[in-house]
């Protein structure tokens, strides 16, 4: 009995410690975001007894944060909408039609999931320059669609293939043809999988840094991750302000996560969980 | 009102034929059952009628109109699937109306037809539920309702009762026959369950390995099976099929089955034959009939209303008899049962074809 | 008969219509760039559009005369072999802890997963602060327990920069592995764990002889997934150290990026050749790993 108590206590201690390890840095940054740099320098870990909420206003107004946020939202939303639609169409074709070359098309698309980004990124840069897409939101959006497409098709195809064929036959007898079946059966029945890929794609693109840094250079076209880095550069040693900027970027994700935690976890681990 | 006619229909997957030269005519208003063991090609045949499967060779006609190549939606048929294939993202009302919406039936009429079908199937309380919130029996009725609202020329059913529990299956059977009587529509019904076939069909088409073995009313195919396969497939327990030898004697024939000897007035060429006797036609009595089957009882199954007795026919196989529940014999005792005239079937052992009935 | 031809043609058009957008995007922004990178690797590419064919010179130089590349490969390989075991191992232990039905398991699970969702740029800044010499949390703790001698600028010291970044990266990814392991544990038949409970063996024995074998497929998958992802690591390095100090944290990705866009050497051919080599390394690694584990699986059953 005693031993049981002891081991339970130890386990709890370990879990609490790990929680401090994962959450501590967030709490620390959140705390810093409400303090000025001189305050932080005087005592880096003191609580924000007098929270300086004005710092958020200042960070927002003295920097280009509004623009970064808008760029991130616009580019990510557009990319996710397109990649979901295009990916779902391709997955539908691969899952529901038997045609010559089906396996080859599938294998070609899916194999690129494991490709390292270098193998395309230099050529993508060249293509963007050649077609005047360099340093444009459209160019970045196209690249985002392309890099998320293989995984999207892969996940959706696996799900669509499990929708019973009889459903499609019933629809066929009810008079619905190829495209209508996609809208009226595949998309609604496949909604759980589609929601999953939407979340996965959105988080990935929202956090992307590599492709954005290659394709975007104009400050007015920067997405949030680039913006944060830029902000960090601009503020130099103004730790407090950087912390405020980081919180502005993190808060939307954390808020979203607070409301849809299970869905987000499910989305992010799609493909890895069997 | 419609007829369905298949003439010399073949279906091949690649080079492998799974339907061989099937010809069948379903009359207007008839309830035709396609019966056969699993894998014999019932569903494939039905799906060729529906237009879900292409026809490799031969012709399918509905109402004398050639249907080869006509898409499913243009054939004016409705199908009830084994898995019901209800649209999971639509409630019952939308499921029922989905086919009509496509046909641009006016909104009010859709509502009226859905309401009528729902009323006739007792689905009104569930109209706003999704399929996952329905019981198996309710789902089955929605699937039937989806066919009814379409008011099609032909109803096609592919084992619609096989996912129901036993009690529900019996009551649903009656509901479906009632539905057929009420609508007077042409129906083609696939099943592997002979009880369903016998109780529901106007006629039964028994299939074996992609071929039609026999078509007839339930009593015809039961009493006068065209071959050993049909004879052995129908009835519970099925017909006893025993191998024996025929030898001409005078104007008639002597059939030797193990040590038993049966005498027929009809002539038969000498050689081996398969002898068929239905279990329920073997009843103890003082008469001799065509001869007696004798042996020692090996099992007695008392089913309440009746008793199934199996005995080892001397020098041959096991024979089953279906006796009434007053039978008092025990395992190991001797038993002798006469074969009644008119109840003996002789089949060709090679082809299984009926040779004669005596 | 023409009916059927017509239907077949209709189906072909449908397939084409469904696939075309994806195939176009795939061809233009994945397949073509891959081929072009291969092609580029045989040239020296000047900014004015001059392309000078150099054959395999780029490859020769990378493989024989480029110590930075060698360093980058070494670092990346160390990173991608060490971190998967930390991520998956710790993830499994945490998942097991939650599996034993501790109170607030749901809260822990959600809390531990949070770093997975945070942009790597933010993670990088946070950790560069934690590693700060003067006021970083790590040095502060060391000083607190009297280990002043061990304090250092963790990312500024070539000896510790790489391990420090690996730790920071694993901070982000352990939660991911924990969730996947937990899901796999929950999908095991509960009798297995109960039987192990009854056998009354120690938790370590249970881990080695029951849990790990049962989760073999999941764990292998996670290891391979982590391995591949670490082969691509870029953001974290770029925001914190840019590969420094003294190439201590240079990775294949950062080096390619530097050669292509930073050094202003204005030759896209050389980095393309690096990309090709690295691509082949990654593919080979994936193939070897897959074959290796397939083989083992086959032997077992
Ligand atoms: N797509 C297919 N490809 C090849 N063979 C098939 C295919 N579909 C069905 N078959 C074969 O056709 C035969 C008849 O199948 P089916 O009509 O489903 O039988 P059932 O009488 O049980 O409904 C079976 O032997 C089955 O294996
Ligand atoms: Mg079938």
Image (cartoon, coloured by chain):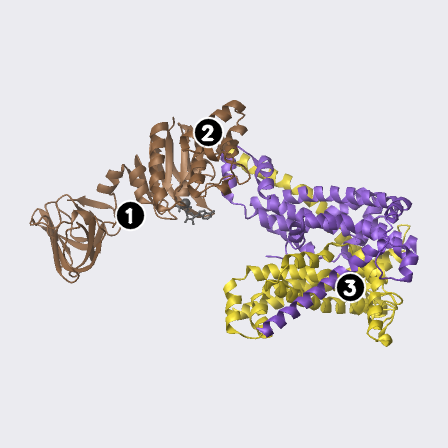
Chain colours: A purple, B brown, C yellow
Pointer 3 residue: C168
| The quarter of the displayed image where residue A274 is located | bottom right
Q: Quadrant of the N terminus of chain B?
A: top left
List the residue tagged with mark 1.
B233
Q: Please identify the quarter of the rendering in which residue B148 is found.
A: top left
The residue lying at 55 percent from left, 68 percent from top is C298
Numbered label attached to residue B150: 2
Image quadrant for the C terminus of chain B? top left
Callout 2: chain: B
Task: State which mark lies toward you, 3 or 1.
Answer: 3
A268 relative to B139, above or below:
below
Q: Is residue C239 left or right of residue B135?
A: right
Q: CA distance from mark 2 to mark 3?
A: 63 Å
> Which numbered dot is residue A21?
none
Where residue B241 appears, as percent x and y from the top left, is 22, 52
Do badges 2 and 3 share one subunit? no
């Amino acid at each position: 009995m005693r031993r049981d108590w002891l081991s339970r206590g130890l386990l709890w201690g370990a879990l609490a410690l790990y929680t401090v390890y994962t959450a501590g840095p967030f709490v620390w940054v959140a705390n810093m975001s409400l303090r000025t740099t001189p305050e932080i320098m005087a005592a880096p870990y003191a609580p924000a007894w007098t929270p300086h909420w004005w710092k958020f206003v200042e960070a927002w107004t003295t920097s280009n944060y509004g623009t970064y946020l808008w760029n991130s939202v616009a580019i990510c939303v557009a990319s996710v909408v397109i990649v979901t639609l295009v990916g779902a169409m391709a997955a539908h074709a691969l899952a529901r039609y038997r045609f010559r070359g089906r396996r080859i098309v599938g294998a070609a698309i899916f194999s690129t999931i494991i490709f390292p980004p270098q193998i395309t990124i230099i050529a993508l840069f060249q293509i963007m320059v050649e077609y005047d897409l360099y340093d444009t939101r459209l160019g970045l959006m196209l690249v985002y669609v392309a890099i998320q497409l293989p995984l999207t098709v892969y996940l959706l195809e696996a799900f669509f293939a499990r929708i019973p064929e009889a459903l499609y036959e019933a629809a066929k007898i009810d008079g619905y043809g190829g495209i209508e079946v996609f809208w009226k059966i595949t998309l609604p029945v496949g909604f759980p999988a589609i929601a999953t890929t939407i979340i996965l794609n959105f988080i990935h693109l929202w956090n992307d840094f590599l492709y954005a840094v290659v394709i975007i250079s104009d400050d007015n076209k920067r997405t949030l991750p680039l913006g944060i880095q830029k902000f960090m550069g601009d503020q130099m040693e103004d730790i407090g302000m950087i912390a405020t900027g980081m919180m502005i970027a993190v808060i939307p994700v954390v808020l979203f996560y607070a409301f849809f935690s299970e869905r987000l976890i499910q989305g992010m681990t799609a493909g890895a969980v069997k | 009102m419609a007829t369905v006619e298949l003439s010399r229909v073949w279906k091949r997957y690649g080079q492998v034929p799974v339907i061989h030269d099937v010809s069948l005519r379903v009359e207007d208003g008839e309830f035709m059952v396609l019966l056969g063991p699993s894998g014999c090609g019932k569903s494939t045949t039905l799906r060729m009628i529906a237009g879900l499967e292409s026809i490799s060779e031969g012709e399918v006609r509905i109402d004398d109109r050639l249907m080869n190549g006509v898409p499913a939606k243009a054939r004016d048929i409705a199908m009830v699937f084994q898995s019901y294939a209800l649209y999971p993202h639509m409630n019952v009302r939308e499921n029922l109306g989905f086919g009509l919406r496509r046909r641009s039936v006016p909104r009010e009429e859709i509502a009226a037809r859905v309401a009528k079908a729902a009323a006739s199937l007792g689905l009104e309380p569930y109209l706003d539920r999704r399929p996952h919130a329905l019981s198996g029996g309710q789902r089955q009725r929605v699937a039937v309702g989806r066919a009814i609202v379409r008011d099609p020329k032909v109803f096609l059913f592919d084992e619609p009762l096989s996912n129901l529990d036993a009690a529900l299956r019996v009551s649903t059977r009656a509901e479906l026959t009632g539905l057929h009587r009420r609508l007077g529509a042409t129906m083609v019904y696939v099943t592997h369950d002979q009880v369903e076939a016998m109780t529901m069909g106007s006629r039964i088409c028994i299939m074996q390995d992609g071929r039609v073995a026999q078509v007839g009313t339930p009593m015809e195919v039961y009493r006068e099976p065209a071959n050993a396969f049909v004879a052995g497939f129908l009835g519970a327990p099925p017909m006893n099929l025993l191998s024996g030898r025929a030898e001409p004697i005078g104007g008639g024939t002597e059939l030797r089955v193990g040590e038993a000897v049966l005498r027929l007035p009809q002539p038969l060429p000498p050689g081996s034959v398969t002898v068929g006797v239905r279990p329920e036609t073997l009843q103890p009595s003082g008469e001799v009939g065509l001869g007696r089957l004798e042996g020692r009882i090996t099992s007695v199954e008392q089913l309440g209303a009746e008793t199934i007795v199996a005995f080892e026919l001397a020098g041959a196989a096991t024979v089953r008899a279906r006796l009434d529940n007053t039978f008092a014999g025990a395992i190991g005792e001797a038993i002798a049962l006469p074969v009644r005239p008119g109840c003996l079937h002789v089949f060709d052992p090679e082809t299984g074809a009926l040779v004669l009935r005596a | 008969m023409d009916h059927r031809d017509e239907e077949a043609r209709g189906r072909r058009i449908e397939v084409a219509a469904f696939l075309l957008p994806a195939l176009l995007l795939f061809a233009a922004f994945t397949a073509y760039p891959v081929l072009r990178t291969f092609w580029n690797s045989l040239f020296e590419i000047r900014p004015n559009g001059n392309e000078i064919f150099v054959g395999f010179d780029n490859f020769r130089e990378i493989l024989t005369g480029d110590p930075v590349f060698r360093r980058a490969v070494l670092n990346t390989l160390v990173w991608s072999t060490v971190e998967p075991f930390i991520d998956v191992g710790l993830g499994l232990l945490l998942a097991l802890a939650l599996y034993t039905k501790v109170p607030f398991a749901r809260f822990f699970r959600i809390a531990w997963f949070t770093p997975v969702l945070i942009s790597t740029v933010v993670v990088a800044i946070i950790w560069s602060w934690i590693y700060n010499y003067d006021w970083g949390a790590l040095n502060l703790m060391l000083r607190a327990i009297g280990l002043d001698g061990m304090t250092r600028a963790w990312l500024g010291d070539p000896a510790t920069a790489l391990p420090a970044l690996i730790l920071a990266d694993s901070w982000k990814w352990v939660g991911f592995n924990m969730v996947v392991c937990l899901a796999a544990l929950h999908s095991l038949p509960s009798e297995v764990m109960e039987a192990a409970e009854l056998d009354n063996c120690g938790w370590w024995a249970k881990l080695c002889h029951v849990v790990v074998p049962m989760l073999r497929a999941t764990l292998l998958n996670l290891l391979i997934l982590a391995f591949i992802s670490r082969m691509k690591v870029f953001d974290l390095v770029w925001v914190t150290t840019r590969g420094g100090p003294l190439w201590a944290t240079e990775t294949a990705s950062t080096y390619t990026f530097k050669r292509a866009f930073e050094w202003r050497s204005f030759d896209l051919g050389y980095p393309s050749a690096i990309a090709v080599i690295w691509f082949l390394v990654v593919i080979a690694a994936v193939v070897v790993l897959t074959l290796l584990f397939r083989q083992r699986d086959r032997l077992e059953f």
